[in-house]
């Protein structure tokens, strides 16, 4: 059984990531509106009927804005810790509210979702890995540093969404006030291009097939710069920069990656099989 992944949106204006197999799927965060989530899912041929739950990384608005309406409309369970729930002031129907415990796997159909703590300036922030039949995808954004938890989980992934938030020079020369620059790079803010590429080079497993670079800053980064930086050391991994304006393609992760045979695009044409799969 393989996993299908897509970024529905990635950036400070909203984050939402889809991970699923042939039978069920989860969303990690839902920071865009219910209507926009539906539109982007439809364009990709993904069915909301397959989505079984929303997992919440932390309470910042760009990760939670769409959750109340999306959860209520589709009766989707929301997995969120109490501090994040309080911090986000979310209103969610009680029967749909679920908590989770660090490092304890939540099983939803054929999907196993494992949360682990991360460094970020939120009340109780988490990243997640999602595994199905031996194939693992990680969702690693809003990270202050590449801590031991991140290194350990990244090194197990066949594919990952990885934050590359800012370029150091662009941040230094940009117009942000000093306190905001300090917050971004202070260890509980965001991961820079340099930090992300160092993690990728040092800890990517040989079987990683796709890396989706996520949560790029609008003012302190450039998608082409990031693409070129990572492609220079890709080693057969398909590099995709997730947009803050639109969804990515759906990518097929089957766990059988051979770097020497990897193509340039990495996406498959899902149109002939969308009805049966999604």
Image (cartoon, rainbow, N blue to C red):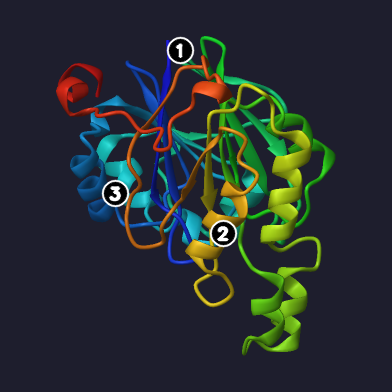
Give neighbour class at mark 1: few <14, some 14-19, many 20+ (Cα, 10 Å). some
Q: Earlier in the sequence, mark 3 or mark 2?
A: 3
Q: Secondary structure at mark 2?
A: helix
Residue 126, percent across and down? 66, 43
**Residue identifier under label 1:** 110
Label 2: few (<14), some or many (≥20) within 10 Å?
many
Measured Cα–Cα span from mark 3 to mark 2: 26 Å
Using the rendered image of the protein, determine whether residue 124 is visible from the camera's viewpoint: no
**Which residue lies under the disc numbered 2?**
226
Q: Nearer the viewer, residue 34 or 256?
A: 256
Q: Secondary structure at mark 1?
A: loop
Q: CA distance from mark 2 to mark 1?
A: 34 Å
Up-down relation of residue 67 to residue 20 (above or below): below
Q: Quadrant of the C terminus?
A: top left
Relative to 90, is 70 above or below? above
Which mark is drawn over residue 213? Answer: none
Identify whether 251 is placed above or below 273: below
Q: At x 76% / y 52%, what residue is drawn?
A: 119
In this rendered view, identify the residue nearer to me: 143 or 68: 143
Counting from the top left corner in percent of width and height, residue 256 is at 51, 14
Measure the alpha-carbon separation of dots 3 and 1.
23 Å
């Amino acid at each position: 059984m393989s996993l299908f992944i897509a970024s529905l949106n990635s950036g400070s204006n909203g984050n939402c990531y889809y991970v699923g197999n042939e039978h069920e799927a989860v969303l990690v965060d839902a920071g865009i509106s219910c209507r926009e989530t539906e539109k982007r899912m439809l364009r990709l041929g993904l069915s909301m009927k397959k989505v079984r739950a929303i997992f919440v990384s932390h309470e910042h608005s760009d990760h939670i804005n769409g959750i109340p309406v999306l959860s209520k409309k589709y009766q989707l369970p929301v997995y969120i810790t109490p501090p994040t729930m309080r911090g986000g002031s979310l209103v969610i129907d009680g029967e749909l509210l679920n908590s989770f415990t660090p490092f304890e796997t939540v099983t939803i159909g054929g999907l196993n979702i494992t949360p682990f703590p991360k460094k970020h300036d939120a009340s109780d922030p988490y990243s997640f890995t999602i595994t199905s039949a031996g194939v693992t995808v990680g969702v690693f954004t809003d990270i202050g540093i590449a801590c031991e938890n991140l290194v350990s989980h990244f090194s197990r992934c066949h594919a990952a969404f990885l934050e590359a938030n800012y370029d150091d020079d662009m941040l230094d020369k940009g117009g942000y006030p000093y306190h905001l620059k300090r917050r971004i790079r202070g260890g509980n803010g965001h991961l820079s291009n340099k930090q992300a590429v160092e993690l990728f080079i040092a800890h990517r497993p040989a079987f990683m097939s796709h890396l989706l670079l996520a949560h790029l800053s609008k003012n302190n980064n450039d998608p082409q710069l990031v693409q070129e930086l990572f492609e220079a050391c890709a080693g057969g991994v398909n590099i995709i920069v997730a947009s803050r304006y639109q969804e990515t393609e759906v990518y097929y992760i089957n766990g059988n990656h051979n770097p020497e045979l990897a193509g340039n695009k990495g996406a498959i044409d899902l149109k002939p099989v969308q009805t049966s799969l999604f």
